[in-house]
Image (cartoon, rainbow, N blue to C red):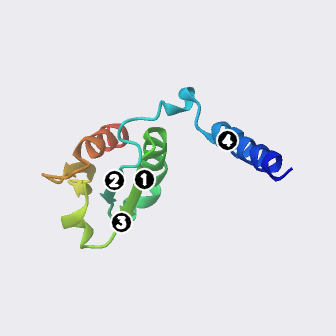
Amino acid sequence: MEATVLRLCATGLAVLGVACQRSPRSRTSPVDAGTVVTVYLPPRAVDQLMGRLAAVAARHQWALSVRTDSAAVREADLVVADSAGALVGRLRSGSPAAAQARQLADAVLR
């Protein structure tokens, strides 16, 4: 009787484990999913650009960190600056998320 109960429990756990695995179709996430892209925005540009930045990051499944503090100018992957009244993007050299930052800049600042 005990052996039967143990077999049923083991079978139930095995079936549950197989059922909880991701399907092959759900494994189509981008290679860079989970990447964190840090962006510096001047405080006056946050309202103007935040929605577009979030939309691009969500589409690519990137985590987005938007900062407005002065330290972020040196640390951010993408720095959005005001140049003669126009917002321009500067990429930090050597950034591990440089490719993603470039895509953000192209999509948001065109």
The residue carrying mark 2 is 37
Work out whether mark 1 precedes mark 4 in sequence or the reverse, and give the earlier one. Answer: 4
Q: CA distance from mark 3 to mark 1?
A: 13 Å
Which mark is in front, 4 or 2?
4
- Judge depth for marks 4 and 3 and give the one in front: 4
Number of the front mark, 3 or 2:
2
Helix, strand or loop at label 2? It is strand
Left or right for 80, reference 31? left
Label 3 and label 2: CA atoms lie apart by 11 Å
Q: Which residue is mark 3?
A: 67
Percent across and percent down for residue 106 are 30, 38
Report the quarter where the C terminus lies. Answer: top left
- Labels 1 & 2 near each other (Cβ < 8 A): yes
- Residue 63: mark: 1
Q: Label 3 amino acid?
A: Arg
Label 1 residue SS: strand
From this view, report whether residue 81 is shown above or below residue 14: below
Mark 4 residue element: helix
- The residue under the point 37% across, 66% down is 43
Locate residue 4: give its quadrant: top right
State whether residue 72 is above or below residue 97.
below
Q: CA distance from mark 4 to mark 2?
A: 39 Å
How busy is the neighbourhood of tag 2: few (under 14 within 10 Å), some, or many (20 plus)?
many
Q: Residue at x 24, y 57 (%)?
A: 81
